[in-house]
Image (cartoon, rainbow, N blue to C red):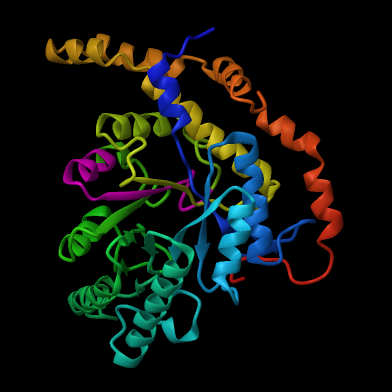
Amino acid sequence: MTTLSSSILMNLENQAIELPSWAFGNSGTRFRVFGTPGTPRDPYEKVADAAQVNRYTALAPSVALHIPWDKVKSYDDLRAHADDLGVSLGTINSNTFQDEDYKFGALTHHDDSIRQKAIDHHFECIDIMHATGSRDLKIWLAEGSNYPGQNDMRARQDRLHDSLRQIYARLGDEQRLVLEYKFFEPAFYHTDVPDWGTSYAQVASLGEKAMVCLDTGHHAPGTNIEFIVMQLLRLGKLGSFDFNSRFYADDDLIVGAADPFQLFRILFEVIRGGGLNNPEVAFMLDQCHNIEDKIPGQIRSVLNVQEMTARALLVDREALDAAQSRNDVLAANAIFMDAFYTDVRPTLAQWRESRGLPADPMAAYAASGYQQHIAAERVGGTQAGWGA
C-alpha cells in the first residue's frame, strides 16, 4: 500500500472544497428538470444536505449561495443554522441571467436603467455578504450576441468595465470580486467574457480585490486548462475554481468523471504555483446532479478532488526538476505518470479512519438512512431547482 508522508497528509487535512447550494436542488437537460424525493425546498434544507457531505468527508466546510435562488428573510438565522450544522456560508453568486429585462444584457446593456438594475442587484449581494460573513462575490454573465452586427462589442466591454467598477467600489475591505468566464452559451456569436484573458483584463483594471474564477468546464475542446491555471497563479489573479467535468460543452458533471488525468494535471499546477490551501485560491464545486442522488454525488466529487490532490503531491519534484534540466523527456514524463497511476485509495481510507471518519464515506452515508429520512419528511412545498 502506498505511503503518504506526514507533509502530504497535512496538506490533505487542510484541504477545503466549497459546495454549491444549487447542486442539492433539481436539475436536468435543456428539455426537462427532473424531480427526486427528498430534494430541498428552501436554503435551510440545502445547507442541511451540504452539511452531510462535510460530516462524512471533513472536506466541505462551507456552502456557496446563489441570489435570488437562496434569498431568505434573515441571513443571521441562516448563518446560525449553518453554524449549528458545522458549516459556514461562503461565496455569494449573483444572477443576472433569468430576468426578462436581461434578454439583451445586464451589466453590458445599452439601456442605463437596466444596467443600473443589474448593478443594484450586485449591491444587494454585497449587503448579503455582510450578513453572511462571505468574502467573495462571484459574477458570471450570460451576455453577448448571436449575430454579426447585432451589437457594438467594444461598447459592451466599456459598459462592463464601468459596471464592474461601481460594484468593486462597494466591496468591503475584506471582500473580493471574482469574475467567471465562459467560452459560449447562451450567446453564440460573441460572449462578453468568453475566456481567461478577457476576465483578467477586466479584473486587472479594477484592483487587487478583483480576481478570476476558472470553471473547468468553460473552455474550448483541447484547451490546456493547466496552462491557464499556471498563468493566473503566476500573475496572482486566480481567485477561485469551479470544479466540474465536461464531455462536450459545459456539462457540469462530477469533477474528475470525464478526464481524471486532466484534474491531476490541474492540481499539480495548483501545487506547483502555491495555490493549494492558499486562502487566496478558493476551491468550489459547480455541478448539477441530473440523474444521480445529490448528496452522494457531492461526496464522490470532493473525494475525487482529494484523491487527485494526493496523487499530485506524490510527484517527485526533485527528480522531475533534474530530468527536465537535462532534457530527458521520457524520464520526466515517467515521473509524472508514475504519480498519476499510483492508487492512493486504500491509504486514504485508512487515514480517514485514523481521524474518526468513515473509511468509505459513500457507504457510510448510504447506511445512515438520511436519504430515506428526507424523502419521507420533505413532502409538500416546492422543490428547489433552477431558478429557486
Residue farthest along the left direction in this orientation? 326
Is residue 291 or residue 172 the one in the foreground?
Answer: 172
Residue 85 part of the magenta-drawn span:
no
Q: How many marks are shown on the rendered structure?
A: 0
Q: Nearer the viewer, residue 130 or 5?
A: 130
Q: Quadrant of residue 133?
A: bottom left
Q: Is residue 219 visible?
A: no
**Residue shown at the point (39%, 65%) measured from the top left:** 140
Front-most of residues 326 and 116? 116
Percent from the top left, x then y, of residue 339?
A: 40, 16
**Is 378 positioned to the left or the right of 139 in the image?**
right
Would residue 118 appear left or right of 290 to someone viewing this image? left
Quadrant assignment for the C terminus:
bottom right
**Vertical comparison of 274 with 114: above or below:** above
User: Residue 66: x and y, percent?
Assistant: 51, 66
Query: Magenta stretch containing residue 232, yes or no?
Result: yes
Residue stretch in magenta = 228-252
Judge whether residue 137 can be spotted in this image: yes
Q: Position of residue 69 (x, y in %)?
A: 57, 70
Q: Looking at the picture, how far across and down is residue 204, in whole percent?
A: 17, 60
**Residue located 47% across and 9% down the image:** 3
